[in-house]
Amino acid sequence: MKRRASIVLLSTAFASVFAAVGAHAADLVISAPNWPSGQATANILKIGIEKTLGLAVDVKPMGTMNAFVGLEKGTVDVQPEIWRPNFDDLVRKYVDEKGAVTLAGKSVAAWQGLCATPSAAKTIKSIGDLGDPEKTKVLDTDGDGKGEMWIGAPTWLSTGIEQVRAKSYGYGENMTLVETEEDVAMAAVDAAVATDQPMVFYCYAPHHVFQLHELTRLEEPAHDAAKWKLAPASDPLWIEKSSATTAWDAAHFQIGYSSALTAKRPEVANFLEHADFTADEVTQMSYALGVERQEPLEFARKWVEQNEARVEGWAKP
């Protein structure tokens, strides 16, 4: 009797587990990158799709490279911010060659480069100044004789490209290139400005940091595609094999989604093609999450509520 009772209990337990899993199984998975606006957009798309199309959507933190793999395999359905030219190598592979990923037609204009705090801008005005140890010593915070410069988070492809640029321009020899998460770097920028300490760092826009501080973008030669030679990031030696001696090309980002959605969930593909954000809105998202520390999901709920008619319009054919 005890054995039979145990079997019954186990069967009931397994049934409960499977029922719970089935009840919570998501219809869609959206990847969330590790920067504020991308996290906000991921959750806005989640709430918007659930509200207008009645689907269950999960948001999962994920790097862009892993997201592209997931988009091809079917474990991920949407990537909210695909930056270009940063991810052009992945776009060529998964969009152009394999056709596994589709880029939504609407995009947000952006730019990226290196910025200086007011104190640093007195001495360092151009990227050429970074090659002068006498000038960059003002950036030395640990007393080792070399200036420090944040170039991005460890998982960002742009961080690797900034390593390429430092090597190609030559300032990598007398600078310590710092890789850490963005919230740590932005806290350092806040502290540097507050204490009038010089700091130079990787910057991009739209971003809330320009609402908070007066920053100067370092001058450098205009972008020349012929002087940008980037090996595929899949090559372990791609940084050593690459070179870039001019400014970044004009940037933009857009939503990417699995091409399979066109047939499997055409209403979702339609929603994503209609979803649009302005640069100002992206800056506000960045400020809300990065400065005000709002939770991405709660921010998204309020955003969708405040833009209800607009979000409903995204779902219309």
Image (tube, grey):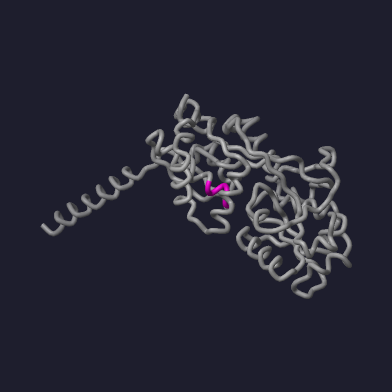
State left or right for residue 23 relative to residue 167: left
Q: Quadrant of residue 50?
A: top left
Position of residue 192 measured from the top left corner of the image (x, y, whole percent):
71, 67
Question: Residue at horizontal 49%, vertical 34%?
Answer: 310
Image height of 95 relative to 299, above or below:
above
Q: Quadrant of residue 99?
A: top right
Q: Nearer the viewer, residue 314 or 103?
A: 314
Q: Residue 12: give x, y in percent of width and height.
A: 21, 50
In the rendered image, the quadrant that contains the N terminus is bottom left
Check if residue 38 falls in the magenta segment.
yes
**Residue drawn at (46%, 50%) of the image:** 297
Q: Main secondary structure of the magenta part?
A: helix
Residue shown at 57% from the left, 52% from the top:
36
Spot occupied by residue 121 in the image (x, y as percentages of width and height): 81, 60
Highlighted range, magenta: 36-40
Q: Is 259 in front, or is 127?
A: 127
